[in-house]
Every structure is written in C-alpha cells, then in structure tokens.
C-alpha cells in the first residue's frame, strides 16, 4: 500500500514527495518520459527572495537557507538589473521598492553590461541578492531522497482514471492503490481534481515564451546579471554562454505542451532590442512553458477541506523552484499535523480553504 501517491514529477511533486517520504511510502507518477518535462524544465531558474506576492515572498525567504546550504548549496551568484526608459519613472520606482533594489547610474550599469543603450536606458537599479538555481540537481536530489526512503519515482505513467473507495485507486498504465493523493500535476492539477471527484480551484495556465540568442557582440556574459524591463515587460538572462530573452508574456491557455508564438517573441525581442546597442540578428532556439496560477496568484498547499486525503501542491506559477524547500515542508507539516514554522497568517493564505 502506498501512503502518498504523488501525481506530477516536476519540482513540486518531487519536493513534496521527498518531505513526505520520511512519514510513509511515496510513489511519484510522471506522465512524460523525463522528470520536470513541462514548467520545471523551462524555468528561468532564478532565486530572488522579493519576487512574488507576500505569501510567496515568505516562502522564498524560508527557503533561502536550504538553497544556500543543503547538499553543498544550489545557488551561484547572478544579480538582477532593472532597466527603465524616460517615460517609466513612476513604474521604475514601484519596481525598485517592491523588489528591494538599489538605484545606480546608467554609467555604473554600463560598466557591468556594456551593451546598454545610453540613449534609451534612463533609469537603472541593481540587486546583488539574486542567484542562479541548479534546478536539475535540486530535482534529482529530491528524487534521490524519495528512493532512499524506499519510495519510487516513475515516468511514462499518465493517469487516466481515479476512483475512491476504502482507498484511492489510480490507473496509470497499471492500478496504484494509495491512502493519499498529492496533486502536483502543474497545469493539469484542476483536471486531476475533477478526475478524482474533487472540486477544482480555478487554476489558470499562462504561456511564457523564451528565445536563446548568441552572446551579444561576442561578449563574455558570465558576469552579467539578469536584465529586466520595468513592469517585467521583458527579461534577459545569461545561459551557457548565450542569452535567453523572454517577452515575459502571460497569455492564458489550456494545459498543453506549450510552444512559443513567433509574434509574441518578436515583440519581446523588440522591447529588449530598444534598450541595447547590439542588434539581434538570429535566434538559436526558442520554446515556451506554462506558469499556472490560482486566482490570487499564490500557491495552494495542503489537504482539500472537503476531501482530506486529496492533497494540493499546485499553483506554483513562476515560483516553483525558489519556494520548493519551504513549500514542501509546509505541505508535509499540514499533512502530518506538525506545527509549521511559517507564521499562521501566511499559512492561511496558502491553504486550499481560502478558495472554497
């Protein structure tokens, strides 16, 4: 008998499964050929503690120590630089305050990122406390914990039917019986709930597109921060010697294996192009992922109030990796009855009860 059957092998499911594996037998079911195939495999992979709604920021801050120290740490320095044009003074000040950034001069910014266009970049700010996350190692380490505690992590197990009697029965190529289901199915979490006879939470997936371009001007990008337009209108991040540029789109879509929209990418690249001197001449590749949000854009963690053996681990949006240590621990605390370390008011903002 499985104690916790986790549906979804992204960062949400793996981290939740790892925490719960100390309290019972865990099996993770992933529909695709590989773990983290959808949103987790298409993340910008940045840890920025001040990014998100207040409850998300609380999870970020509670996750920081784990990210920095567990298993030798998962973070390497990156930094974040905010760029604004002449007509964006008010929005720039709002972003600086919300993300706890330090305004710097354009000359100081260009000393770090020499391709910034001094004719269009008028406002700049920097935050050193932003890091790249080793996302693959983080997922694999959580999976290793599950296996080390006697659990299983299975791929190519697409769930096709869920029924509930004395225990849950889940068909995914074979029938799995479990005392509890952990719904970590990402963009498909509401569909899994409906399949299980549980009321959905109003989850909405949003597409986010990315383009990888050659290093601008042949520069060494290793020391560059992530660049972000005011209002998160676009961003660019060094990646393996090249630059990932995103229009920061958020187009509502149905759950799917997402792909980038050419026009959306072109518009985002144009917004990036306006702020730099090096022309974008080609894309090496492009892709898209889904960021799935509850109506209040805050994670949904814990047992469903009407079906206590159906446990939500959903609505990670763009915060899945950076919140995963604290979010998974909170979920485990709520399931096992342990006292959460996170303040009670924040916990209330994360529980499924708020959406009923």
Image (tube, helix red, strand yellow):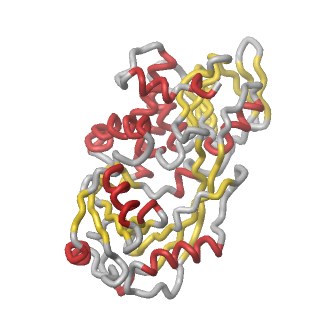
Could you tell me residue 355's position as x and y percent?
62, 28
Question: Which residue is found at the position 57% from the left and 40% from the top?
Answer: 315
Q: Nearer the viewer, residue 285 or 306?
A: 306
Question: Which residue is found at the position 62% from the left and 32% from the top?
Answer: 183
Left or right of 101 in this view: 278: right
Q: Nearer the viewer, residue 177 or 227?
A: 227
Q: Nearer the viewer, residue 142 or 340?
A: 340
Could you tell me residue 78's position as x and y percent?
30, 60
**Which corner quadrant holds the C terminus?**
top right
Left or right of 305 in this view: 192: right
Residue 4 is at least partly visible in this image: no
Could you tell me residue 140's position as x and y percent?
45, 45
Residue 71 is at least partly visible in this image: yes
Question: Which residue is found at the position 39% from the left and 48% from the top?
Answer: 51
**Is the residue 167 above or below the residue 13 in the image?**
above
**Is the residue 200 above or below the residue 23 in the image?**
below
Question: Which residue is found at the position 34% from the left and 64% from the top?
Answer: 82
**Which corner quadrant holds the N terminus?**
top right
Could you tell me residue 125's position as x and y percent?
28, 63
**Is the residue 327 above or below the residue 87 in the image?**
above
Q: Quadrant of residue 90?
A: bottom left
């Amino acid at each position: 008998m499985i104690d916790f059957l986790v549906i979804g092998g992204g960062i949400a499911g793996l981290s939740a499964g790892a925490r719960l594996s100390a309290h019972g037998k865990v099996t993770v079911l992933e529909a695709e050929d590989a773990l983290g195939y959808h949103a987790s495999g298409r993340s910008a992979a940045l840890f920025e503690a001040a990014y998100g709604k207040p409850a998300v920021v609380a999870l970020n801050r509670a996750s920081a120590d784990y990210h920095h120290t567990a298993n030798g740490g998962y973070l390497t320095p990156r930094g974040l630089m905010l760029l604004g044009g002449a007509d964006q003074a008010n929005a720039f000040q709002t972003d600086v305050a919300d993300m706890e950034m330090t305004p710097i001069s354009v000359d100081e910014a260009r000393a770090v990122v020499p391709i910034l266009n001094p004719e269009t970049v008028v406002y700049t700010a920097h935050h050193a406390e932003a890091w790249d996350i080793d996302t693959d190692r983080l997922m694999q380490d959580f999976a290793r914990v599950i296996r080390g505690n006697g659990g299983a992590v299975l791929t190519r197990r697409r769930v096709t039917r869920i029924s509930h009697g004395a225990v849950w029965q889940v068909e995914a190529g074979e029938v799995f019986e479990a005392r509890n289901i952990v719904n970590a199915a990402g963009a498909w979490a509401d569909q899994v709930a409906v399949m299980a006879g549980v009321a959905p939470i109003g989850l909405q997936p949003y597409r986010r597109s990315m383009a990888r371009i050659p290093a601008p001007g042949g520069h060494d990008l290793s020391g560059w921060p992530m660049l972000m337009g005011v209002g998160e209108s676009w961003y660019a991040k060094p990646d393996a010697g090249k630059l990932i540029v995103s229009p920061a789109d958020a187009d509502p879509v149905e759950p799917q294996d997402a792909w980038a929209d050419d026009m959306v990418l072109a518009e985002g690249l144009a917004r990036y192009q306006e702020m730099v001197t090096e022309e974008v001449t080609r894309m090496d590749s492009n892709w898209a992922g889904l960021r799935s949000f509850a109506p209040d854009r805050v994670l949904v963690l814990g047992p469903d109030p009407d079906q206590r053996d159906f446990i939500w681990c959903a609505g990670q949006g763009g915060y899945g990796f950076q919140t995963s240590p604290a979010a998974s621990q909170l979920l485990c605390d709520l399931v096992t009855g342990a006292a959460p370390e996170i303040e009670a008011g924040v916990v209330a903002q994360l529980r499924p009860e708020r959406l009923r």
